[in-house]
Image: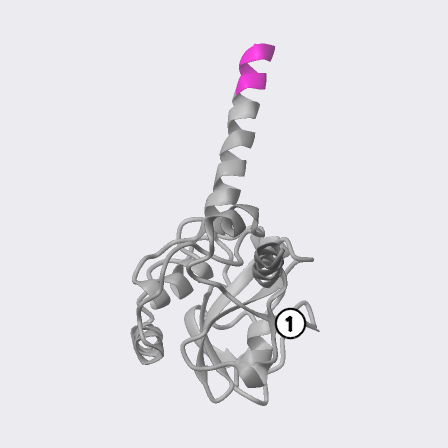
């Protein structure tokens, strides 16, 4: 019975692991939900209320067309100086700028590494990985800081090179995003279905 209870608690942690900002430690991989929970935005907490994360505001490789991107009229954050839709690539912001989306402050969650296989298979996309993380917190922060200094994480792409790729790379040295792979697989199935329908009609 205790074994079942422990598995339930582990599963609950995978799905709902909200964290109080005051409990964050440098080197933590954190995320916040976006667009009603349809995807997650990831970053590395580096201490002093700051997060290094990877983003793109031009959206040329994003989900929205240029006409749907908000104009650059957002006010500058008094806490960290960030202005929405002006930063590009690897940026450093306060926690509120990291977790804010469409004017709403979303809760912060821990990203879990070394997730058990059963939990990993049942997980919500973008919340955990079965990859292990052997780096010290100091090493994780240093990788993130180095990427910030050089803005060296390549060209942003919503599927191939996104915020989760960046955070996972900082933690493990591996650039990976199961969340992106899921959506990429879904998009491929849609394209294949469209091609089959087109051939059938012809």
Q: Quadrant of residue 147?
A: bottom left
Magenta stretch holds residue 200:
yes
Q: Quadrant of the C terminus?
A: top right
Q: Quadrant of residue 27?
A: bottom left
Magenta segment range?
A: 196-202
Q: Looking at the image, which residue is at 60% across and 54% down?
A: 4
**Residue to which mark 1 is pinned:** 107
Q: Of helix, strand and loop, which mostly describes the magenta segment?
A: helix
Viewer-side residue, 4 vs 99: 4
Q: Looking at the image, which residue is at 51% across and 57% down?
A: 59
Q: Looking at the image, which residue is at 56% across and 24% down?
A: 193
Residue 83 location in percent, x, y? 55, 78
Q: Quadrant of the N terminus?
A: bottom right
| Residue at far front of view | 1
Residue 152 location in percent, x, y? 30, 67
Viewer-side residue, 182 vs 53: 182
Residue 40 location in percent, x, y? 56, 60
**Could you say whether the residue bearing mark 1 is in a helix, strand or loop?**
loop
């Amino acid at each position: 019975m205790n074994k079942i209870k422990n598995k339930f608690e582990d599963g609950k942690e995978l799905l709902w692991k909200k964290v109080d900002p005051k409990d964050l430690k440098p080197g933590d991989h954190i995320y916040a939900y976006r667009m009603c929970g349809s995807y997650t935005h990831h970053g590395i907490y580096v201490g002093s209320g700051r997060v290094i994360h990877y983003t793109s505001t031009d959206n040329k490789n994003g989900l929205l067309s240029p006409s749907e991107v908000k104009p650059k009229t957002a006010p500058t954050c008094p806490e960290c100086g960030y202005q929405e839709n002006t930063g590009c690539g690897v940026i450093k912001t306060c926690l509120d700028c990291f977790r804010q989306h469409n004017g709403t402050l979303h809760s912060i969650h821990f990203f879990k590494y070394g997730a058990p296989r059963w939990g990993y298979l049942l997980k919500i996309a973008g919340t955990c990985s079965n990859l292990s993380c052997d780096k010290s917190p100091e090493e994780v922060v240093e990788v993130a800081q180095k990427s910030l200094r050089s803005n060296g994480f390549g060209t942003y792409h919503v599927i191939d090179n996104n915020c989760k790729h960046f955070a996972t790379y900082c933690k493990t040295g591996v650039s990976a995003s199961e969340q992106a792979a899921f959506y990429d697989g879904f998009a491929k199935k849609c394209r294949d279905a469209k091609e089959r329908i087109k051939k059938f009609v012809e």
